[in-house]
Image (tube, grey):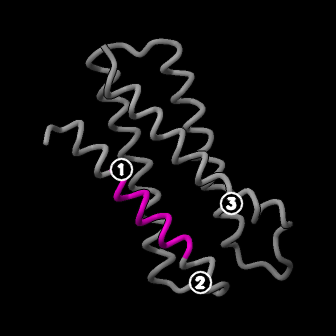
Amino acid sequence: MNSSQLRVVGAGVAFLVMFLSGFWLNRTGKPYGTLIFTIHKITGLGLGIFLYLSIRQIHQVAALSPVEIAIIVVTALFFVATVITGSLLSIPVSRPMPDVVSRLNKVLPYFTLLSTTLTLYILLNRR
């Protein structure tokens, strides 16, 4: 396996851990268990850092085109929106967050996964 394939596999495993821990958190409800909540958040943070460093390394080898930059920006926006909605849901407040926050947090991870997959595919298969 070359390094590009290892990156994709690593990102896939991290997304899988993040999705499974997110489903587990959703099923157990508040208050969230410290261990699974920590695994979920650290996996997301690690994945974000990993993707940033990977994209930066690809950009250093050969400059990114405007289309590639646009795809990366969309992916980053999905990632940030997913983190924000997840953070809003984890805040201990006396009133629950509006339903739209919960719904967005259930949909945005799929868009983030699809966008990240597309981004990695385009960047790793560029000529």
Specify start and end residues of the magenta stretch as a single range: 11-23
Q: Give the Cα separation between the discs numbered 3 and 2.
A: 16 Å
Circles 1 and 3: CB distance less than 8 Å? Answer: no
Q: Residues within 10 Å of mark 2 (few under 14, many from 20)?
A: some
Image point 52% across, 13% down: which residue? 66
Q: What amino acid type is highlighted by mark number 3?
A: Asn
Mark nearer the N terminus (2 vs 1): 1
Q: Mark 3 points at which residue?
A: 105
Q: Mark 1 points at which residue?
A: 11
| Residue 86 to residue 108: above or below | below
Q: Is residue 29 left or right of residue 33?
A: right
Helix, strand or loop at mark 1: helix
Q: In which quarter of the image is residue 31?
A: bottom right
Question: Residue 111's x, y, as percent?
Answer: 61, 46
Q: Which amino acid does label 2 sit on?
A: Tyr
Q: Mark 2 points at which residue?
A: 32
